[in-house]
Amino acid sequence: MTRMLEAVGLACVRGDRRLFEEISFTLGDGELIHVTGPNGAGKTTLLRLLCGLTRPEDGEVRWDGTPVRELGDDYRRRIAYLGHLNAIKDDLTCRENLRYGAALGGTAADEGRLDAALDGMGLSGLDGVPVQVLSQGQKRRTALCRLLVSDRPLWVLDEPFTALDKGAVATIRDAIAAHVADGGMAVLTTHQEVGLDVARTKTLGLGG
Amino acid sequence: MSTPFAVASLVRRDLTLAVRRRTDVLTTLFFFVIVVSLFPLGVGPDLDRLRTMGPGVVWVAALLASMLSLGRMFAADHADGTLEQMLVAPYPLALLVLGKVAGHWLTTGLPLVLMAPFLGLQYGLAAGALKVLVVTLLLGTPCLSLIGAIGAALTLGVRGGGALLALLVLPLYVPVLIFGAGAVESHVSGLGAQGHLSLLAAFLVLAVAFTPWATASALRIALD
């Protein structure tokens, strides 16, 4: 079954400022959209709009032809969102954060997969330590582990590479590429040249 | 994965966090204990006077203690992005809110209920009156958390939100206060607390049914 995320004539107004208008695109299985643009062009807003966190001034987002507003939870069951904020609790360990994150997202945390994800992100030695004492990069990696165990077709990633070292950037890049190659979809913003190895990449330029 | 599981996991997470960060829970509890204990020191040891004002004082202190902790209900989740994840979670937000409120009540309301009989002793309340006091708090403090959640959600991310929160929420607490303290008084005067308790219970049912939806809408607006 092919799936399709579709944006039709999206417009967004923040205060008195028109951030963008007439944004339309389609995203199918095995495709990635790289949203580009200068600071303040509305990249984050566009991603939040795709997740339903913000309402568009005009236009709509559709999943398989049905407006996502009508799909509600059925649509939300298909997206994994990583915002600027990591959504992890300082007082919990990486593993606990992932377990609670998975439960909130609607997937049972399979310990084997958690192990694999933590291992892949180089966090396996940090069990039993509250996230509080970890570095920014390690926190970001924990947040990204949540995506790896989430089983969602659509990944919406806002600057996934911030605060990461070279090794972690490569790991995430490969994880995104593998997800898309596996028939998943991804929408991401990034300022870094990470050289994503994805055959079907679309670029969406905002502002500027 | 079902909705009750997700909500239960949210409650469990909040309880774990409360255990790891005990100061938040303890400050609320100590505030309650100190406020209630100040009155006998202020008005003197006249037992008759203390007996009449006891239930009211305990109730007002419970109300203020509950309000003191409201700001924290969503603030941490808002700051670290967990609230965004709650909004994109494939579950009705109102039910997740109910989970958050349950976590709040278990960590701030329930300790007050358990502490109340000991504080009531300072006011010379008889065993029967203490029992009624505990029952009213058991029915009333969840109402405070539920109503307070609306205010906490509305003032999320607002500068100087604390004072605004008090202005929004305190008037809404009035009915709970009247029936809560009233129940103990009417029990002491021999009229029986049945009527007051029924009204409190009705109030709780209404609050459970309607406030989570209002809170969920306020959260959506706060994060838009």
Image: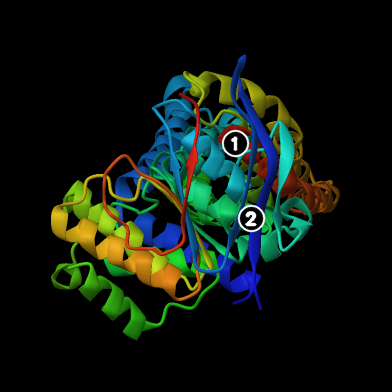
The x and y percentages for residue A130 are: 22, 59
Q: Nearer the viewer, residue B171 or B82?
A: B82
User: Are the residues under badges 1 and 2 in a single subunit?
Assistant: yes
| Any part of residue B127 in sight | no
- Label 1 crowd (10 A; few <14 / some 14-19 / many >=20): many
In terms of secondary structure, where does tag 2 sit? helix
Residue at 43%, 77% in the rendered image: A109
Specify the color scheme: rainbow
Chain for disc number 2: B
Amino acid residing under circle 1: Ala
The x and y percentages for residue A140 are: 28, 53
Residue at 31%, 45% in the rendered image: B23
| Any part of residue B160 in sight | yes
Q: Nearer the viewer, residue A27 or B202?
A: A27
Chain for disc number 1: B
| Distance between the alpha carbons at the discs numbered 1 and 2 | 13 Å
Up-down relation of residue B185 to residue A195 (above or below): above
The x and y percentages for residue A155 are: 48, 60
Q: Which residue is mark 2?
A: B98
Image disc number at residue B153: 1
User: Mark 1 touching mark 2, by CB under 8 A?
Assistant: no
Write down the quadrant of residue A84 in the picture. top left
Q: Quadrant where the N terminus of chain A lies?
A: bottom right
Q: Quadrant where the C terminus of chain A lies?
A: top left
Up-down relation of residue A76 to residue A54 (above or below): below
